[in-house]
Amino acid sequence: MSTPPAATPAQHPAVPFLKGHGTENDFVIVHDPDNALDLPAATVARLCDRRAGVGGDGLLHVVRSAAHPEARAMADRAEWFMDYRNADGSIAEMCGNGVRVFARHLQRAGHAGAGDLAVATRGGVKRVHIAKDSAPGAGDGDITVLMGRADLPAATVTVAVGARTWPTTHVDMGNPHAVAFVADLDHAGDLLTEPSYTPSAVYPAGVNVEFAVDRGERHLAMRVHERGSGETRSCGTGACAVAVAAARRDGLDPAVTGAPVTYTVDLPGGRLLITERPDGEIEMTGPAVIVAEGHIAPGLFAPSQTVTS
Ligand SMILES: N[C@@H](CCC[C@H](N)C(=O)O)C(=O)O
């Protein structure tokens, strides 16, 4: 049997997409159950481009676990795999806001109802609870994710923005985070460029950097510079990292006291509630909404043209 010729950009069918966000961490959502789409990093970066593409902090590629080589082993526990990509096309292990938006999409598409859902991610299978909507189909109930345990490897990393430097707490939420407690969130500057950190060898694959301040008892505010996406208006794994770093700083460890600890974390795009349980499991609760649907012009999937003089 001969292989059919590859589709030219003009022949490439328009691909449906949705746009959604969780506390204004926004995503392009591509529903591709059979993993039929070719999504190299350059294509993802074009789709996430805010001027020439659809625009987003990242892309949620929605694939059946059985159809994706990285998720096949989880297919018996989770039907759907969140193939998460950062805005620059790089791959990340987990996205806490993304997994809530992913669940909201599955609910709207009729693949999940209110209640519990398992989602496969590169960081393992995550259990998600979709709260009942205020009205049928409103899509406005909060979504809670069991994010797994935080790991706090001993590492002394200093983060710098301009002339200011801070020591950080290394928190692994499946993806890497460096948390700095600062006196004022403005001290993190415009965050247009990635903060520098030393020694850089601690994070060979890069790191998400969080800047956090206290707002009250077990109440924090933060900003984040995300690996592969720049400053975003929210980061779910980052909020979990900040809450756990604050708990340890405050002498609170639910595994020792036997009592859960909840922190309210305010981000530029909204509020997340983070609870660490005595078994170490971290629950994150927040909103997830779908705001648009449409079709992607075939040209965005075409390989970049090289201009020669
Ligand atoms: N915004 C996400 C995190 C996305 C991945 C991150 N940029 C990384 O590269 O690790 C979240 O809500 O957790």
Image (cartoon, rainbow, N blue to C red):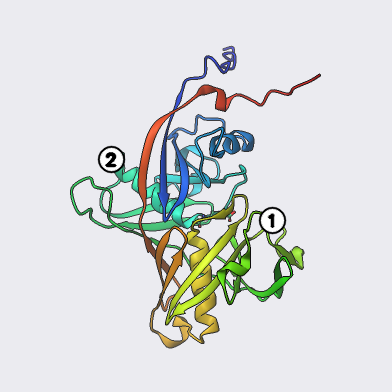
Specify few, some or many for label 1: CA neighbours under 10 Å numbering under 14, 14-19, or 20 or more. Answer: few
Residue 157: x and y in percent read 71, 72
Question: Ligand 1, what quadrant?
Answer: bottom right
Task: Respond yes or no on whether mark 1 lies under 8 Å from ligand 1.
Answer: no
The reply to whether residue 255 is in sight is yes
Classify 153 as above or below 14.
Answer: below
- Type of amino acid at the residue the image marks with label 1: Ala
Q: Is 174 situated above or below 105?
A: below
Horizontally, residue 129 falls left or right of residue 63, namely left
How far apart are labels 2 and 1 at the CA level? 37 Å
Near-viewer residue (168 or 33): 168
Q: Mark 1 points at which residue?
A: 205
Question: In the image, residue 205 lies at what x, y percent?
Answer: 69, 56
Question: Mark 2 sits on what residue?
Answer: 110
> Measured from the top left, where is residue 118 in percent x and y?
38, 53
Residue at 49% across / 80% down in the picture?
A: 247
Q: Residues within 10 Å of mark 2 (few under 14, many from 20)?
A: few
What is the secondary structure assignment of the residue under circle 1? Answer: loop
* Upstream in sequence: badge 2 or badge 1: 2
Q: What kind of residue is marked 2?
A: Gly
Marks counted in the figure total 2
The residue at 42%/35% (across/down) is 33
Q: Residue at x 45, y 32 (%)?
A: 34
Residue 177 percent coordinates (x, y): 60, 65
Residue 77 visible in rendering: no
Query: Left or right: 150 with respect to 132?
Result: right
The dot on residue 248 is: none
**Residue at 43 percent of width and 80 percent of height:** 216
Which corner quadrant of the image does residue 108 belong to? top left
